[in-house]
Image (tube, rainbow, N blue to C red):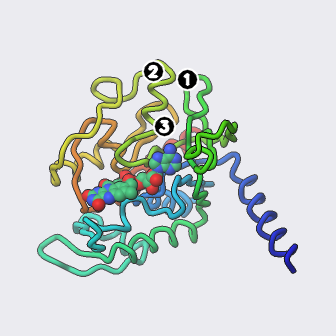
């Protein structure tokens, strides 16, 4: 019995890991934008893996604002909540409130149910850079990163990579720092996030969701971080819409490259 439990876990984990060594889309970060992108791409039939540094995916959605576990979403993004079967309550005009624990767990459930594979406790420390294109990810266990242990990583190949790492836009920063390249931003570099301005930030989160270098897309707060736009606080419509947009962009790009 003891051996069966261990063998079952090891066999099924390594099957999942091996099947994810070459994917259509690799997503870095399991916040709302990454999870929504994972859901839509998996639903479109793409092979998707998502890497999350922490034990629990969900990013900054669990805690609402100052740990008041309610979040706000505007009407523009309600179709995504309907699609993902998330419950919400009307508040005023175009604004709705949602229990953040219900919302976060629903996003995780629907992304995995659609077929996306989530690897938690896994940190992305670099990209694979081939022929001037981002072609995959370099991954390691988070405890290895935290303990600064001298342990080599593993590599996952991907046709497209999404940086959904939030405020720090870690993948874009690493790509820029190491490879003497220009990103598709005003300065050619990661411009860094500005202070809080809700309306502007919500609009630009979606505008700035794009391919910033061949093979590398940005979504969610990382989009604004890369392009030098604002933060917005605990309103999540922009994050959800950004996840939906990046999935559509990648779907179009992968369909073109198949033809
Ligand atoms: C822990 C946390 C708490 C927050 N709390 C608040 C708050 O109280 N109020 C507020 O207004 N905003 C808060 N934010 C920001 C707000 O939640 C964001 O605007 C929103 O969650 C952004 O969504 P996102 O999809 O861009 O990514 P995020 O929700 O920021 O999630 C990004 C995810 O990427 C993961 N990640 C980052 N780098 C790597 C890597 N190299 N490898 C693997 N995984 C990686 C992170 O662990 C995180 O789970 C918080 C963000 C975080 C991460």
For residue 147, which quarter of the picture?
top right
Mark 1 is surrounded, within 10 Å at the Cα level, by few (under 14), some (14 to 19) or many (20 or more) other residues, namely few
Q: Mark 1 and mark 3: span between their CA atoms?
A: 11 Å
Residue 201 vertical position relative to residue 190 in the rendered view, above or below: below
Q: Secondary structure at mark 2?
A: loop
Residue sitting nearer the eye, 207 or 2: 2
Residue sitting nearer the eye, 247 or 137: 137
The mark lying in front, picked from 2 and 1, is 2
**Residue position for label 3:** 216
Q: Quadrant of ligand 1?
A: bottom left
Mark 2 is surrounded, within 10 Å at the Cα level, by few (under 14), some (14 to 19) or many (20 or more) other residues, namely few
Residue at screen point 29% across, 65% down: 77
Residue 225 vertical position relative to residue 5 in the rendered view, above or below: above
For residue 169, which quarter of the picture?
top left
Mark 1 or mark 3: name the one nearer the start of the chain: 1
For residue 217, which quarter of the picture?
top left
Label 2 close to label 1 by CB (< 8 Å): yes
Residue 197 position, x and y percent, is: 15, 49
Whether residue 238 is visible: no
Q: Mark 2 and mark 3: span between their CA atoms?
A: 13 Å
**Residue position for label 1:** 132
Residue at screen point 59% across, 28% down: 129
Q: Secondary structure at mark 3?
A: strand
Residue 206 vertical position relative to residue 236 in the rendered view, above or below: above
Q: Secondary structure at mark 1?
A: loop
Q: Mark 2 and mark 1: span between their CA atoms?
A: 9 Å
Mark 2 or mark 3: name the one nearer the start of the chain: 2
**Residue position for label 2:** 181
Direction from residue 117 to residue 217 in the image, left or right: left
Residue 4 position, x and y percent, is: 86, 75
């Amino acid at each position: 019995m003891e051996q069966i439990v261990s063998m079952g876990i090891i066999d099924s984990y390594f099957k999942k890991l091996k099947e994810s060594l070459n994917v259509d889309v690799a997503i870095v970060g399991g916040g709302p934008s990454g999870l929504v992108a994972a859901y839509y791409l998996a639903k479109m039939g793409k092979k998707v893996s998502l890497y999350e540094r922490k034990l629990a995916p969900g990013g900054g959605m669990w805690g609402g604002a100052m740990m008041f576990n309610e979040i706000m979403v505007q009407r523009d993004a309600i179709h995504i909540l309907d699609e993902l079967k998330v419950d919400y309550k009307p508040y005023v005009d175009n604004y709705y409130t949602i229990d953040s624990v219900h919302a976060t767990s629903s996003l995780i459930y629907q992304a995995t149910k659609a077929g996306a594979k989530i690897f938690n406790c896994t940190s992305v420390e670099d990209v694979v850079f081939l022929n001037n294109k981002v072609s995959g990810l370099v991954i390691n266990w988070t405890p290895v990163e935290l303990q600064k242990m001298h342990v080599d990583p593993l590599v996952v190949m991907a046709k497209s990579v999404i940086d959904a790492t939030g405020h720090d836009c870690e993948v874009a920063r690493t790509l820029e720092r190491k490879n003497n390249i220009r990103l598709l931003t005003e300065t050619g570099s990661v411009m860094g996030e500005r202070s809080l301005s809700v309306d502007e930030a919500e609009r630009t989160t979606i505008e700035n969701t794009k391919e910033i270098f061949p093979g590398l897309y940005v979504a969610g707060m990382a989009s604004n971080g890369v392009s030098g736009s604002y933060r917005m606080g605990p309103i999540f419509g922009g994050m959800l819409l950004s996840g939906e947009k990046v999935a559509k962009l990648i779907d179009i790009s992968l369909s073109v490259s198949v033809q």
